[in-house]
Amino acid sequence: MKASILLAASGALMAAAGPVLQERRVVVATDVVEEWVTVTVTEGRPLPTMWRPGKVHVRPHWSSTSSIEPSSTTSAEPEPTSAAPEVPSPPPPPPAPVVPDIPPAPPAPVDVPDVPAPPPASPPPPPPPPPPQQQTPSAGDDYTSTLLQHHNVHRANHSANALGWSDQLAGYALQVAKSCRFAHDLSPGGGGYGQNLAMYGTTDNAAGFGANKAGAQAASDYWYNGELNKFPSNGYGQANPDMGDFEEWGHFSQLVWASTQQVGCASYLCPAGTIVPTMQSWFTVCNYSPAGNMGGAYGQNVHRPMGQPTVSA
């Protein structure tokens, strides 16, 4: 047999390549030419004066030799020769070829293309416009988006701005939820914000129920749908409506309070014997800034509903 219990409470980021010039060399090969004279000597006669080699000529690739035919001998004895025969002077060597000093050719011009500078980066496209305000909660499983949706869909029905999420307020809410004491506590952060509380306990797999479901149920089913019709019908537009049944509708008025800008929530599974003696229970805490339910400001912050369809968890 399954049992469940629920509670709610409220408070205040070229080099140009020129042609390569190969070295030019002029090689002149030379021959060395020696000239010799052969002299015949007759026995018993004095030796003639020996002629030594003449000049050595260095000429490119040309060579020549000359010789003197030996004198013939007869039976008659010639007169003694006291001097060497006259040897004709060799012809002068041809002039060495003149190799002109040819300066190296200048490097051929190389065309370097004119590369234009890259165009400036185009400005990033403008961001797309924000999506229109959704009127129904999304099916996402993120706790933050779930709780924002289950607040803002109801605030839109009362012409109130959409709330933003505050991690700081959510941190304060988690401290209170983990205490597993179902009572208002504004001590984390020093207070100065509004606070709504809700609890859901069950013996049927409370852990499987999940924090998202617990938070959505607290905002939509308990604080809004459960209290909307309890707000005094003649209290809209009044600075201070009848506060006799404030405990019955104070969560609703905080949820739709127009000047509130941020919310931060936490849902924590408390063990049996803490909030509920015999069962586990989900303790949901939501903190609001600026705080709602301020005396004398109800007429400016709690507006009549626009008749949009009912949304539940």
Image (spheres, rainbow, N blue to C red):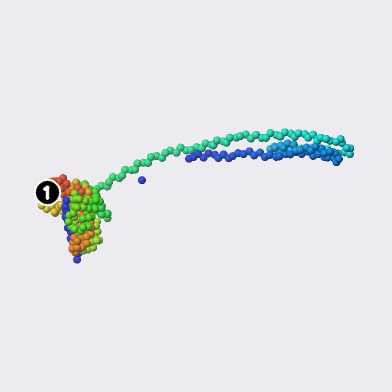
Check the image and report above or below for 272 versus 21. below
Q: Evaluate whether residue 256 shows in this view.
A: no
Check the image and report above or below for 308 versus 80. below
Residue at image coords 49%, 40%: 15
Residue 77: image quadrant is top right
* Residue 245 image point, x, y percent: 11, 53
Of 106 and 239, the residue lying toward us: 106
Label 1 crowding class (10 Å Cα cut-off): few <14, some 14-19, many 20+?
some
Amino acid carrying mark 1 in the image: Pro
Of 139 and 172, the residue lying toward us: 172
Residue at image coords 81%, 39%: 39
Residue at the limit of the structure toward the bottom, as seen here: 1
Of 130 and 273, the residue lying toward us: 273
* Residue 62 image point, x, y percent: 71, 38
Residue at image coords 87%, 36%: 78
Check the picture and name the quadrant holding the N terminus. bottom left
Check the picture and name the quadrant holding the C terminus. bottom left
- Secondary structure under the numbered disc 1 in the rendered image: loop
Q: Is residue 79 left or right of residue 280?
A: right
* Residue 72 image point, x, y percent: 84, 38
Residue at image coords 15%, 46%: 297
Identify the residue under disc 1: 241
* Residue 6 image point, x, y percent: 18, 59
